[in-house]
Amino acid sequence: MGFCGVGGFLFLVFVFGKNIAADKDGWDLCTDTPPADAKLWPSISNGHVGTVVHSDSVYMNGLYNGNGTTSTRARIPAFTALDVINFAPDENVSTTYCLHMNSGIYKEIYRGDHWRVTVTMYAHRVFNRLLVTELTVATDGQQRKLTIPLKYGTILEAETPESGLTPVHVYYKTVPLDVTVESGHSGTETLVFLMSVWDTGRIDVIGNVTLASSVYSALYYITSAMPLEEDTVWPFGYNGHVFWDQDTWMYPPVLVLHGDLAPVLLNTRFRTLNASREFARRTGHSGAQYAWESAFTGLDVTPWPPAQDYEHHVTGDVALALRQYVMMAGDSPLLHDVHFRETVFAIAEFWKSRSVLNRSAGMYEIHNVMPPDEWHYPVNNSVYTNYVAKMALLLPHFLCDVIHCLAPPEFEQVAGKMYIPFDADKNYHPEYDGYTKNVSVKQGDGILLGFPLQLAMTSDVRRNDLEIYENTTGAGPAMTWGMFAIGWLELNQTDRAEGLFFRQLLNKYGAFNIWTEDADGGGVTNFITGQGGYLQSIIHGYGGVRPYADRLALHCRPVPGSTGISIVGLDYLGNSLDISCDDRITKVVRTSHGRQLYLHTSLTREIIPLRPGVPVDMPSQPLAISSYQTLKLPIGQFGVNVPVEIVG
Ligand SMILES: *[C@@H]1O[C@H](CO)[C@@H](O)[C@H](O)[C@H]1NC(C)=O
Ligand SMILES: *[C@@H]1O[C@H](CO)[C@@H](O)[C@H](O)[C@H]1NC(C)=O
Ligand SMILES: *[C@@H]1O[C@H](CO)[C@@H](O)[C@H](O)[C@H]1NC(C)=O
Ligand SMILES: *[C@@H]1O[C@H](CO)[C@@H](O)[C@H](O)[C@H]1NC(C)=O
Ligand SMILES: *[C@@H]1O[C@H](CO)[C@@H](O)[C@H](O)[C@H]1NC(C)=O
Ligand SMILES: *[C@@H]1O[C@H](CO)[C@@H](O)[C@H](O)[C@H]1NC(C)=O
Ligand SMILES: *[C@@H]1O[C@H](CO)[C@@H](O)[C@H](O)[C@H]1NC(C)=O
Ligand SMILES: *[C@@H]1O[C@H](CO)[C@@H](O)[C@H](O)[C@H]1NC(C)=O
Ligand SMILES: *[C@@H]1O[C@H](CO)[C@@H](O)[C@H](O)[C@H]1NC(C)=O
């Protein structure tokens, strides 16, 4: 089944070892008081196995239990959870709890008058079946003999009658009930585990450790959850199901900062292509329809029936992720992989069959959907859904122009006649047929047209969309405020962006920067979807990063409260770039020897070849990086007015 994670092993290693130090500004989250709410402990994960420290459960990528919509990630007892309690009742003990995000290591240090006990936990990145718990006694110690009981079993209930009972093995060593410290030094050298990923992709916020730390933690929680073997981000909330959260919110920052890891997430959709064809068949459509929520088989496991029945935009969101990949990676081996092309074509086929021709208008419409605004369903012609479908229908041509294949002309024909609701009177995009601008919405759905969908529109329309939906959006998930901030930054209104940008941080709780789905602390906890939106508001908002067919646009500005930002290791067309700015100067360095790139400036209209290792400094302004010396569009036409349908 092409799915390596299944039937994996899970170890607990219990050794005596030395401390591992890994301190850097903003990379350590430390506190002397344990979180009042147990859900605010940090998670450690390597994408294969993961746990929330002090919780009773370990989760493994791809391991689900339950029939159909009752499928949830399977819970494995957490033998890793080591609670050090009452070991020295007569003494005053001080404790520090630290998450070292730089190394992915979580550490607790208990200090008494004459001794120090350190508990270290991490998910091993190389031996990814390992969740490691180490106990170090700082005075004297002696190694103990430990026995290894073995547990073996399967999940309890399969998702479908055919999908089988996934086997799971758990190896662990018993934790001794007490530790006697004898004279003489002992201890095993521990494995020093450094996540070198930060060197090749991260965002530094300069001059504000608090903000730097909130960005590092968003990077940490998403990147540490990225598997090396499987294809799905380590399960967080929502029963560990996959939905647009992965494609639209977590994936984009991974694509920009770790282009080599991004295909891992696309693989989720390649692996479940056949199941999605089956799902389309069951709903009476052609091509592939991705389930709103999927788990082991890729078939629909959405427990909320209206979303299963109507929230079809996810199939367009997958196309958006694939399209972003084409624009960022260019002509690369993955584009020639048959799975890539098959997925792109099958999605377009679905949207062709899902659209209906309105003969009197001569336009294609999409009826009976739930937009990202889940408060309104079923509606006709959701502007988000129709536009994402249009983009999906254009993707086969876009791809074929890059890799030289042949796309059926019908896709482009349907896309060309896709109806995109627009109110010419009020000069804005109504969310769906019949929407009036006094109707409250769950999230700013219409504003997603500007970003991430990058629909070409005038600044006036973009402004109206932002104004109107800012007034009608309810409490909203955090991502919605990040997307508003991106919109205002596009219009150079940094003042309006600021409050919306910081509004996202209302969802950040506790010493370990854990995000909740709702700003009041409710909903899914460790909501890395929101953290993905937050990273996008920096990369695409303050960084102004926009992929287009022939260029990568940039407009770098410091995050408020900082003196500058630095996007380290941005991956574009097989190259790696460092982009940094303060409030005056933007600096671009190409750090790799990939394809030749040119920097196009908008103020002085220069075309500067980017030579490996040679930094280019200039006053901050909209910029473009391109493999073309001559851009397909007039120079200076940056920002919201760039049509995205052109093909480079
Ligand atoms: C612990 O601290 C308290 C107050 O700080 C002090 O009165 C007490 O003597 C200390 N106990 C020990 C064993 O040091
Ligand atoms: C799973 O549930 C469906 C009904 O939703 C039922 O038809 C099927 O028999 C169940 N399968 C198993 C293996 O329990
Ligand atoms: C999908 O099904 C086809 C035909 O049954 C098969 O050849 C192909 O390997 C399957 N693809 C995946 C990713 O399972
Ligand atoms: C077809 O389009 C016309 C003109 O825009 C509109 O009035 C009508 O409601 C549409 N019909 C359907 C079935 O959506
Ligand atoms: C959507 O269009 C269908 C026709 O395809 C119509 O029956 C239905 O009433 C429309 N729904 C809404 C909410 O307007
Ligand atoms: C919203 O405005 C429309 C007119 O544009 C009006 O018919 C409707 O009653 C209003 N709805 C609410 C909830 O205020
Ligand atoms: C949004 O609400 C504010 C305050 O109520 C109001 O001044 C503004 O006109 C509204 N904007 C739009 C576009 O309705
Ligand atoms: C934003 O400002 C830049 C100059 O810094 C300008 O080139 C660009 O056109 C402006 N964008 C909008 C939408 O006004
Ligand atoms: C960091 O940024 C936050 C948010 O703007 C601000 O409240 C805080 O004062 C800043 N800290 C420093 C040291 O500038």
Image (spheres, helix red, strand yellow):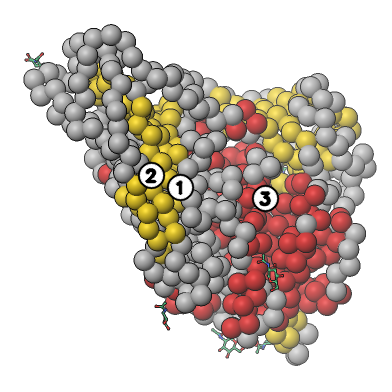
User: In the image, is the residue at mark 1 within 8 Å of ligand 3 by its beta carbon?
Assistant: no
Q: Position of residue 44 (x, y in %)?
A: 42, 39
* First-in-chain label (3 vs 1): 1
The label number, if any, that marks residue 263 in the structure image? 3
Q: Determine the quadrant in which ligand 8 lies.
A: top right
Q: What residue is disc 2 on?
A: 171
Say whether residue 250 is left or right of residue 581: left
What's the distance in space between the residues labelled 2 and 1, CA to CA? 7 Å
Q: Position of residue 522 (x, y in %)?
A: 33, 54
State the image quarter where residue 392 is shown.
bottom right
Q: Where 162 falls versus 211 (above or below)?
A: below
The label number, if any, that marks residue 520 in the structure image? none
Q: Position of residue 116 (x, y in %)?
A: 26, 17
Say whether residue 130 is left or right of residue 144: right
Residue at image x 26%, y 44%? 37
Which one is in front, 551 or 8? 8
Q: What residue is disc 1 on?
A: 9
Kind of residue sitting beneath label 1? Phe
Say few, some or many: other residues with alpha carbon within 10 Å of mark 1 (under 14 / 14 to 19 / 20 or more): some
Which one is in front, 513 or 82? 82
Kind of residue sitting beneath label 2? Tyr
Residue 226 seen in render: yes
Residues marked 3 and 2 touching at CB (< 8 Å): no
State the image quarter where residue 284 is shown.
bottom right
Kind of residue sitting beneath label 3? Pro
Residues marked 2 and 1 touching at CB (< 8 Å): yes
Q: Secondary structure at mark 3?
A: helix
Residue at image x 41%, y 41%? 11
What's the distance in space between the residues labelled 3 and 2, CA to CA? 31 Å
Q: Position of residue 294 (x, y in %)?
A: 52, 66
* First-in-chain label (2 vs 1): 1
